[in-house]
Amino acid sequence: MNDIEAILKSVLPEKRKKSRISKNVEIHDLIEGEYISENIFLIENKYKINDNFQGNILKKIKVHPLILKYAGLKKAGLNNLLFIDTETTGLAGGTGTYVFLIGIGFFKGDEFIIKQYFLSNIASEQTLIKQFIKELNKTKIYVSFNGKSYDIPLLNTRSIFNRCKSDISEHCNIDLLHISRRFWKDMLENYSLQNIEQNILKSKREGELDIPGSAIPEAYFNYLDSRNAKEMKNVIYHNKLDILSLTLLLEKINRILYSRNFDNVNLFEIGKLYLQNEFPEQATTIFKSIIKGAPDHIYAIRELSFIYKRKGNYIKAVELWLKAVKYNEEYAYIELAKWEEHKNKNYKKALEWTEKVLNSKYEDYSYDGEEVQQLKHRKNRLVKFINRQLSISN
Amino acid sequence: MTDNKMIFDSSILQNISIHRINKAKKAELCDFPSYFNKEIINYFQNNGINKLYLHQRLAINAIIDKKNTVITSGVDSGKSLCYQLPVLHQLQQDPQTRAIFLFPTKALTQDQKIKFSKLVSELLKTNIGIGIYDGDTPAEKRRILKKSVNLLFTNPDMLHLGILPHHTNWEEFFQNLKFVVIDEVHMYRGIFGSHFANVIRRLKRIAKFYGANPQFILTSATLSNVEEFSKKLIEDEVVIIDQDGSPTGEKHYIIYNPPIVNKELGIRRSAMKETVHIATNLFEQKGQTLVFSESRRSIEFILNYLRRNVDESELVQGYRSGYLPSDRRDIETKFRSGEIRTVVSTNALELGIDIGGLDTVLINGYPGSIASTKQQFGRAGRSGKPSFCILVASSNLIDQYLVKHPDYLFKRNPEQALIDPDNPFILLHHLKCALFEKPFITGEQFGDLPQKVLDQYLQILQKYDLAYESKDKIFWKANSYPADEISLRTTGAGEFILKNDDKTIGIVDENSAYWLTHPQAVYIHQGQTYLVTKLDIPNKVVELEEINVDYYTQAQSKTEFELIKLKRSENIVGGEKFYGQIKVTDIVKGFKRQKWHTNEILSYGDLELPPQDTVTYGYWFSLSEEIITKLTEKKMWNNLKNDYGSDWKNLTERVRRRDEYECQHCGIHEKDKALDVHHKIPFKQFDSPEKANRMDNLIMLCPSCHRKAERTFYVQSGLAGLAYLFRNIAPFFIMCDSKDIRVHSSQRIGLGTDGPGLVIHDSMPGGIGLSEKLYEMHYKLLWEAYTIVNSCECKDGCPSCVGPVAENGAGAKRKVLEIIKHIMKKN
């Protein structure tokens, strides 16, 4: 121990417990694959279309227009989807987090191919990134799980860091985490890929082959120290299954949308998804069917009423607002007041609705927020109109 | 105010003990450089600026000449323009130019950004991105800044925490980085500065990665070692611009000493009340005045009294940390425009926030350093008009010393700024961050750190599994974000929110919360008094209720030490020294309620607040029994508890009866608790109790007046003097700021030793090795202390040696020398 080390003892971490394995076991001793350049080991797996994975069938995917629109895409051919998942040395982000495994999956002919590039020494990261960028140039659409905020920015950081020119961050991205959160909103405890596999795809991983995601960085550091790739085999399995699950999950989401079989999804959210992505017809159908099944679904009533309003169909909109005021929905009073004032020019009725909402929602007027200010403003204006009408008729 | 005379009434004039006048100085002007674009010159000339001051021109020349430049001209001399102009010039030549501007506080960042934005938008036609990146910047704004900002305004903390570890997001910015501007660089001293020096090392390293080699521009207040300090901070050559070509009006420097109100006891009128009195007078003469006072509480007192005294109380405002940023901005603007006449502020307004030149700066009590005093005084002065800088001396010993020795204030060099970038604890943290940011290539350097030392650290990081070496490169190897593990500032504590009726009205930092906002405390905010109804520690909320009371509260605290682990100990001459891990406990144990104006104590309250523990490292030494006996024999030892004699009890009863159970100073009557009996001439100055206890030397006082009287007569004990010396000397040996260590003297220090002695410890939790270094240089420190005291020309002690001594306090200097002689190594 030198002097500096002695001084710093109190702030240095505990040394990592090293597994005392004497023998080096490299990745090529455990898994079939090839070194495509120094320290870059490529593992390739091929699957046939129509293979069955615990009840989920691997199929070529024609991405549903809703998903395309949601991801900001016009159209996607069958062959330009790239499923990606990366394994890294940490979750902290920043330039000190390295990528050591990039898995990609794509359809080719009647096969689905998973290629995994494994980095057996950090020093060769640049080669790995260059290889990935080469793969990327074949396609323009990634499918990922949380790639928008994790994998893609990270790969972008790594390519700048390694001085590789790329347009990674410009590519479009179908992020299945975001879509799953909408599809199964309030229905799952958490939205990890593993949990979705279990509850949505109803599939299970083989525990002894897998490794929990949180343990992966430490496992890689251990591998660098010990040169024993035993746990790396689990990481590669983990990564491969992630990509497979991504494919099956996208297929499942697609099937739900094409088949319009909306059991076991959050239908209201899907209706909103349609609406937000400018498919008002489909959204109308969905909200109507929700209200049919549940006449007091105030949220569906609200959404549907605004679709009608936007289309200028006031008869149907008013019908829904009259329904909504029974549930004391503030917006409905206001919409009715607006309708009476601007469309019907019936200021007395407009005033009635305005006073009703003031009385029922803000009875004691103690809350003096912007909403109340606006309502009071409307009320004053209406009173003025009514008085003017009276004076004219007199 | 008339043209060159203040019309003070005699009540003020008679107490002015020092009045010095600096003559008005004309501006020294230069032309704009001819290589500047006509547009720039025209713009300034259209705005009434036809020429540059000498120092501005010199600074611009140096910067255009690609020299690292440090500008140290006075407050309000147009320092910002020195860097704004070359940056604008460069932007015109190359619109790709990027510059980073670092400020020590968010408020300054705001102020400077707004001004620079105005210049840029009015002067440059090209699209120049300019923005603030700090903790308050919203995520969406951050994204835009990363892509498009030319001029980035931020602080060292953000650079350390957010920018450098994510440098790939700032690729274009770093590729084109031309200037690093560091404003108010004197703020980066001690531990904070040592951290910052390492952040600069990291910044240069990342800039180099992107092929940039930025030039540094620094501005600083006056320091006695500005060149050495700047060189050490940026590890490069610098050009110092210390001329000042800006004009100043006639400047009056005044030290005002509050009158003695009790001759016999030597008690002076409170400086705060005198400050209010003078401020009121200035207000009535319609002069714009900035009043500085040290503590937040005193700010609110002065504000409150002052508002009661004047008609238009809305023209008087307070200013301190703890006010909401929006309120502060509002006050700054209104003060600058003259809408507000008087602002009462803590040193928060000492830094370069632009509030314009003022007629008068009034300081309530010496702010503790010459540099600070100069900064605060620097706020006064408008060209062509006389201005006034008034220091109201408090009854503190150091203030009274300044009254007698004004040259100490006016002639002495200001303090030095010291840093130690190679402190192992600080360095280790930043090497982790640097490694995270980019691998170290064999042979790569880290600032001026010797290669051998760097290699040693990198070895250690590998040994402890934080780094991984392969192919001549060393990589970061941990699943963490090392920048998160440290704060650059020692006071990284959280904040408590002040709530009244569920509305947030302000904030108070965690360290002060126990002290200022304990339950039942009277808290004053913007002149309104509140009662603290709840101190919610887990949620960090203070609940307040508006209340009108005629008293304020004063918390009482104590500091205790506990030994956790003794690491080293050694016999020394005259005692023993120790080094180890200790727990320092500050406890706010109670408070007293005191009446406004009279300060009479109304009642006491107990508090059961959790103690605030700091686990850190300390060095302490104690004196042996033998030494104390020797010193006592020589009557040098004053810490032995006074034995007032067997008749003391009867005696006090007689005094109380004679004085009719009333405090002879403030007149308060004895209630449930007996008042004190005080020796007019200190007991210790007599050789027998009989002489000391003569009836005419005894007087009845309430505890509050008693303390005041004691303070005046306070006999500085040798140990306290020694502690004072250590506090001042130690930073020079270990290159830290005086705030980075704490020094206590005690009768019985505990910590595994019985004797009296000193405890010196790192202020920072966990310590950064400062006290161990001091432990190792024990004799060196004593020798330095001895030399300083021995060669000091003062008679009985002064701020430069053992601390100032009040007129009747005797022999502290002699005592300190005697103690040191007994514990110094004899060669």
Image (cartoon, rainbow, N blue to C red):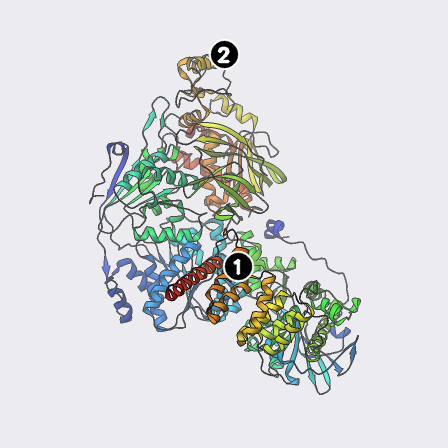
Residue, far front = A394
Point 47% across, 63% down: residue:
A348
- Residue on which disc 1 sits: A357
Q: Nearer the viewer, residue A203 or B549?
A: B549
Q: Would residue B369 be found to the left or right of residue B776 on screen?
A: left
Residue, far bottom = A109
Q: Nearer the viewer, residue A255 or B741?
A: A255
Instruction: Give the position of the N terminus of chain B as an image quadrant.
Output: top left
Q: Nearer the viewer, residue B430 or A157?
A: A157
Q: Nearer the viewer, mark 2 or mark 1?
A: 1
Residue B536: % across, % down: 57, 43
Amino acid type, mark 1: Val
Q: Chain of mark 2?
A: B
Q: Would residue B60 be found to the left or right of residue B28 on screen?
A: right
Pointer 1: residues within 10 angstroms few (<14), some, or many (20+)?
many
Q: Secondary structure at mark 2?
A: helix
Q: Quadrant of residue B274?
A: top left
Q: Mark 2 touching mark 1, by CB under 8 A?
A: no
- Residue on which disc 2 sits: B650
Residue, far left = B3
Q: Secondary structure at mark 1?
A: helix
